[in-house]
Image (cartoon, rainbow, N blue to C red):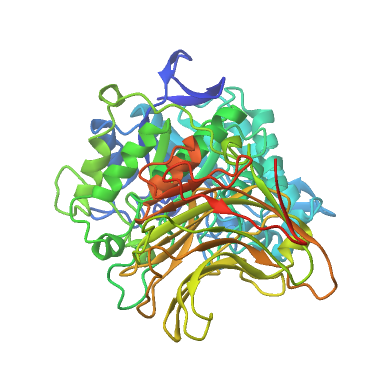
Amino acid sequence: MPYIKIENGVMQEYNNDGLNTGPVATIGLNAYSYLERRAWSATSKGVTGPSNPDYPEDFVFLQSKGIKYLQVMIAPFSGLGSSLAWGPVVGQPSFNGNSVSDLKINQSYWDAVQNFLDAAKAHNIGIIACPFWNILAIPQLVGEDKSALLQSDSKSRNYLRAFAAAFVARYKDHTGIAAWMAGQEITLNTGLDYNTAPAVLKEIAEAIRGQDVLQRMISSGNEARPHFDPRKYTIDEHVEIVRAMNPSPIDTLCENLFLNSEYFSSGVAPVSGQNSALRADFTSCSLPYLKVMQKLASDLGKPYYVGSFGMTTNDEAALQDTTQHNLSTLLQNFYRTGVQLACYWVWNSGSVSDLKPWNVLVTDAGDNNLRADVFAAITAVLDRSRVAPPDALVNRKLNSIFFASSATFTNTSSQWCYFTIAPKAALCPSTNFSISFSINQSATSLATEGPLIRRVSGAVNADARGWVIYKNGLSVDANAFIQLFDGKSVGIDAGNKGRTDVLDTWTRITFTVDANSRIALYVNDFLMGYTQPALPWSNVDGLGAIQIGRTSLTSNGAIVSWKVSDIVLYDRVLSPQEVFDYGVSGQVVNAAGRWRLNGDFKDVINANDGTFAPDRNLISFS
């Protein structure tokens, strides 16, 4: 069977004889419950049957279809409460204080695992083995609260290390195991977070690495950040979380990616009655996200591994996806970004009710097939020799093209500091438009409210028409947001969707306004969130002036300083891919105006230059 080692940042596949057969390049499956459905027996078939085949039959079929890798729960899910819990199956350990004195692992457990691994090896299938699929089982087993996972010398943490070492020592050279997974989504309802979980993963991985003769791949089983509304992190802060959650000796960058995963998909469900709203999918945002992970993997010398991915039948129906378009697009995006291995969730999960919308099962007989079109889409792309090589790496993080030149605004208390763009001809009069700019703010600027960019006729909140990008202070959750106006009514407050305010850091902000669908906010090239227009709105006349700047509404006379660079205005709605491409290259396509602020207020596209009349305020250039 194949097993995997990481060499120079690449997953390399080895055969039973220890010969390197080349880089890994395939799609695997999550078949987590083979042993659980067998009641952890070496001989009994348990509750398996025609609708959930036992592994001896399933391995024959999967081998015939070219499936090489299965990710499997290799120890019980539960710590207490049933005959299938950890104690009855694996064994009830003894302790001297908090130290493990005897693991007391049952021979029947070893026999069940041995038979399973032997069968996998015989059918040339590699098992990605996860001993802690539900890490909460361990505090339950040893009689501790889950908070014990936060304590490095607790019974729970000592048992995690001891069991991992014992398990790997027993199967240190068994080539039925292709790779190891230190845990499965250990931040999920455990009390562990992105600050505390890395230490637990590192300890488990060190125990594995210390015993594994074959030095096989270790992954983290990391849950990608679920979507928050408003989003809590910029994409660059998110990248640092991914880095932290995969500490060495874990030698991959692992994430489980689903429709609710932050940045990977839109992660936003449509509002009732808004059929044209952006529904979370695999096509809108997955390629830009995977390109960011591709670059991070290259920088760290750790291949990016997708431990789980997939969608339910309910998701497919909501997206009206009857052809597996989302799945096929995502598979191609994996290949385009150099993802060597990704495992679909979930294969042959049995009768678990929560998993029925996810479950995929195909057999030779075909009588109990479930979602055969999903399996067909996966097997259609197993032969990577017919796929183009990955795209070139992109480097978008804090691209210096956006702040090589900038304008610094210095406000005195309660005074305006802005420059004005007075169009020579009609400029973006439509109710569909986009605007992008980069901003860098001091602590005083972050705490000071006021409009950043505005194009309004009439008095705001009275008889205004047009739009305002407004900066809130730190006393409220919202950062920057856009307001649309129509006559005497406020049209929509569209923003409050995520982190636009980052201290002393250049941040790219893009708003797109589609009057018939949504107003979207992007930060650093990625969709933060969106809002549907609640009311119609009216833009100003195309000759209406645009003001770039704000008033300092401080009460203590403080001087507020902040920087802006590369303002771009479009008379159309940018797509998520266009926003990302701009962040990568800095190239602007079909824009109505661009103000680079390179020592002046010139519009480099249509000569709608800005003007500034200094008084007690100052705009300088750098």
Q: Residue at x 75, y 48 (%)?
A: 158
- Whether residue 201 is visible here, answered yes or no, is yes
Vertical position of residue 327 compared to residue 121: above or below: below
Q: Nearer the viewer, residue 159 or 133?
A: 133
Residue drawn at x 55%, y 43% is 596
Marks counted in the figure total 0
Q: Is residue 447 left or right of residue 471?
A: right
Question: In the picture, which quadrant includes the N terminus?
Answer: top left
Task: Give the quarter of the image for residue 225.
Answer: bottom right
User: In the image, residue 230 lies at what x, y percent?
Assistant: 55, 67
Residue 70 picture location, percent across and down? 40, 39
Quadrant containing the C terminus is top right
**Quadrant of the image occupied by residue 279:** bottom left
Is 251 located above or below residue 515 in the figure? above
The percent position of residue 40, horizontal first and vertical second, equals: 46, 50
Toward the viewer: 576 or 291? Answer: 576
Q: Is residue 23 left or right of residue 440?
A: left
Nearer to the camera, 177 or 450: 450
Q: Is residue 53 visible?
A: no
Residue at (35%, 64%) from the top-left corner? 514
